[in-house]
Image (cartoon, rainbow, N blue to C red):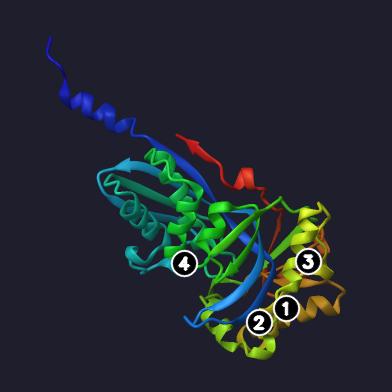
């Protein structure tokens, strides 16, 4: 009896190995700038936290490296594939490990783009973690963090996930115990009010805004002691320049403060968050200010780093 080689090939293609990886967004419990480094980057100290708002990255074995994006991808329209952080992560992983296999990257966007939530950086880290399993590459955590640092300042945190302390330009990360935190309400402006303003936010800071990083050290001690995160212990240096750089966000945050709430800027903005339950009244207030509210929670490390075989 002859062998149907075409049928065998079709069957092999149908069962191509794949993995699915969550790419969670983040908030910063703290961001402090210590100084400007000789290389031009800002030396920071920050305590970061993954949250349960996630992109979904599906990686499937293929002949070449390709990328497709669905979901909230409007702000990515027209972006060359080579500049997408998820694609760059796959290229960097192949270069570092010497693996020459291909992968189809399917990126399902749920994290708002250019909103200060680290979605692109998280996508990159998800690709690194996923490829390490898909290709049985056996790269230790330190290697993945190093590769992530080649892509940008934020991806290294997402390789670790959960709660972590970042220093340097953000690329030196240390895992902390999962933080104990109250419910969180996240507020994000519409897409037309967003844009990558990180460089301009850093550029607006002056030496008067720099500190010693003591707030971050204090929050680290709180987390390590298993105590709950509270408003009074948080700090974000970018709130000093929000009014000039992101006026719509500043107006919304000021309005909520006047109503007795305590909003905190998310990353470098323009999103912000509040540590309180998502009451109908609060959600309505946020919508009236032109922002989209979401009730979210923190995402612990085990959940943030899960890689599912398909």
In contact (CB < 8 Å): disc 2 and disc 4:
no
Q: Tell me which residue sits at (57%, 52%) in the image.
A: 160
Mark before the other along the chain sequence, 3 or 2: 3
Mark 4 falls on what kind of element? loop
Q: Which is in the foreground here, disc 4 or disc 3?
A: 3
Mark before the other along the chain sequence, 4 or 1: 4
In contact (CB < 8 Å): disc 4 and disc 1:
no
- What residue is disc 2 on? 248
In which quadrant of the rendered view does residue 238 lie? bottom right
The Cα atoms of the two marked residues, 4 and 3, are separated by 26 Å
Q: Tell me which residue sits at (48%, 51%) in the image.
A: 126
The Cα atoms of the two marked residues, 3 and 2, are separated by 31 Å
Q: Position of residue 143 (x, y in %)?
A: 45, 52
- What residue is disc 1 on? 252
Q: Position of residue 54 (x, y in %)?
A: 57, 53
Mark before the other along the chain sequence, 4 or 3: 4
Mark 1 falls on what kind of element? helix
Which circle marks residue 152 in the picture? Answer: 4
> Looking at the image, which is closer to me, 197 or 206?
206
The answer to whether residue 154 is visible is yes
């Amino acid at each position: 009896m002859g062998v149907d080689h075409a049928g065998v090939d079709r069957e092999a293609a149908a069962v191509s190995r794949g993995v699915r990886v969550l790419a969670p967004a983040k908030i910063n419990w703290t961001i402090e700038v210590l100084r400007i480094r000789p290389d031009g980057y800002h030396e920071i100290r920050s305590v970061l936290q993954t949250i349960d708002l996630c992109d979904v990255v599906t990686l499937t074995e293929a002949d070449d490296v390709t990328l497709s994006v669905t979901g909230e991808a409007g702000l990515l329209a027209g972006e060359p594939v080579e500049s997408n952080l998820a694609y760059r992560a796959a290229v960097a992983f192949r270069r570092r490990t010497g693996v020459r296999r291909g992968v189809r990257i399917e990126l399902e966007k749920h994290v708002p783009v250019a909103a200060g939530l680290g979605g692109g950086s998280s996508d990159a880290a998800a690709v690194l973690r996923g490829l390490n399993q898909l290709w049985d590459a056996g790269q230790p955590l330190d290697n993945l963090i190093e590769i992530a640092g080649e892509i940008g300042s934020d991806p290294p945190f997402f390789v670790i996930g959960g709660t972590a302390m970042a220093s340097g330009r953000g690329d030196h990360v240390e895992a902390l115990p999962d933080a104990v935190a109250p419910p969180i309400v996240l507020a994000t402006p519409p897409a037309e009010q967003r844009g990558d303003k990180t460089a301009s936010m850093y550029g607006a800071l002056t030496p008067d805004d720099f500190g010693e990083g003591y707030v971050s050290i204090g929050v680290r001690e709180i987390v390590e002691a298993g105590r709950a995160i509270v408003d009074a212990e948080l700090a974000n240096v970018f709130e000093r320049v929000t009014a000039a750089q992101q006026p719509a966000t500043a107006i919304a945050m000021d309005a909520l403060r006047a109503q007795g709430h305590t909003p905190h800027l998310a990353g470098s903005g323009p999103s912000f968050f509040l540590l309180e339950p998502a009451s109908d009244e609060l959600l309505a207030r946020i919508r009236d200010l032109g922002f989209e509210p979401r009730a979210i929670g923190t995402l612990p490390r085990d959940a943030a780093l899960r890689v599912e075989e398909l």
